[in-house]
Amino acid sequence: MPNQTLREVRRLPLSTVLLACVAAAAVAAIAVGLLFGGSSGDEQSSDETSGTIELIPGDDAVGTSVGGAPFDTLDGGESSLGSYQGTPVVLNFFGSWCAPCVNEMPALEDVHQALGDQVAFVGLAVRDQEEDTAQIVEDTGVTYDLGRDQRGDLLTSLGGVSMPTTVLIDADGVVTSVNSGELNAAELTEMIEAQLLA
């Protein structure tokens, strides 16, 4: 009897098999969309008052104003990139689960200390548990401003495609570069001097 059932399945028309595959792919795409935040770029608009920015991929974010893009602080409060208006910003997305993120945090701190008030540094933990974020901050000794982008919405809206991602934002709130991957202190300093302090 099992062999008869197998033969019956093999006789299904190719169009039926293809239709089943397309349906399964559609269900998977919807599930992924719901898992990672659900909204598409078409639903977001550039609006400084609401703090949202248009969903744009990678280098296309260069030249975009971040407006008032909000984020949660580690102590449970709220802040926004708009609060840094008038000061260049190095915005770094990190996670305790991301080894290159952890590796580069001391380099970010070194550059932060070297530049003082010339440039604001902001680190946002992405998809991280609060206790894990607190532990990694303690372990790395970073002192710059920290917050959370728990669902990765801000990371995605700025075109970040991997972790860590470092975004340079000029004093007018305009993105000058989106850099995915680990940076050392020399690389970061060179980028800041060329793009934010020139």
Image (cartoon, rainbow, N blue to C red):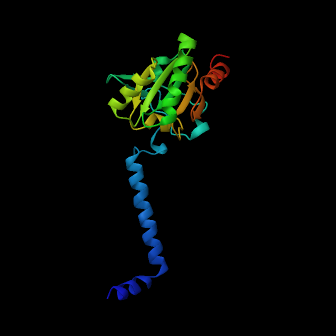
**Is 76 positioned to the left or the right of 115 in the image?**
left
Query: Hey, which quadrant is residue 5 in on the image?
Result: bottom left
Task: Tell me, yes or no, if residue 118 can be seen here.
Answer: no
Residue, far front? 139
Residue lying at 42% horizontally and 33% vertically, measured from the top left: 96
| Tag count | 0
Query: Hey, which quadrant is residue 9 in on the image?
Result: bottom left
Tell me residue 127's x, y (percent): 39, 37
Between residue 101 and residue 64, name the one nearer to us.
Answer: 101
Q: Look at the picture and state if 8 lies above or below 63.
A: below
Query: Hey, which quadrant is residue 77 in on the image?
Result: top left
Tell me residue 51's x, y (percent): 44, 28
Tell me residue 135's x, y (percent): 37, 27
Q: Look at the picture and state if 155 lies above or below 135.
A: below
Q: Quadrant of the C terminus?
A: top right
Q: Quadrant of the N terminus?
A: bottom left
Residue lying at 50% horizontally and 32% vertically, measured from the top left: 101
Q: Look at the picture and state if 55 lies above or below 140.
A: below
**Is 7 positioned to the left or the right of 166 in the image?**
left
Residue lying at 41% horizontally and 87% vertically, measured from the top left: 7
Residue, far top? 117
Task: Tell me, yes or no, if residue 1 can be seen here.
Answer: yes
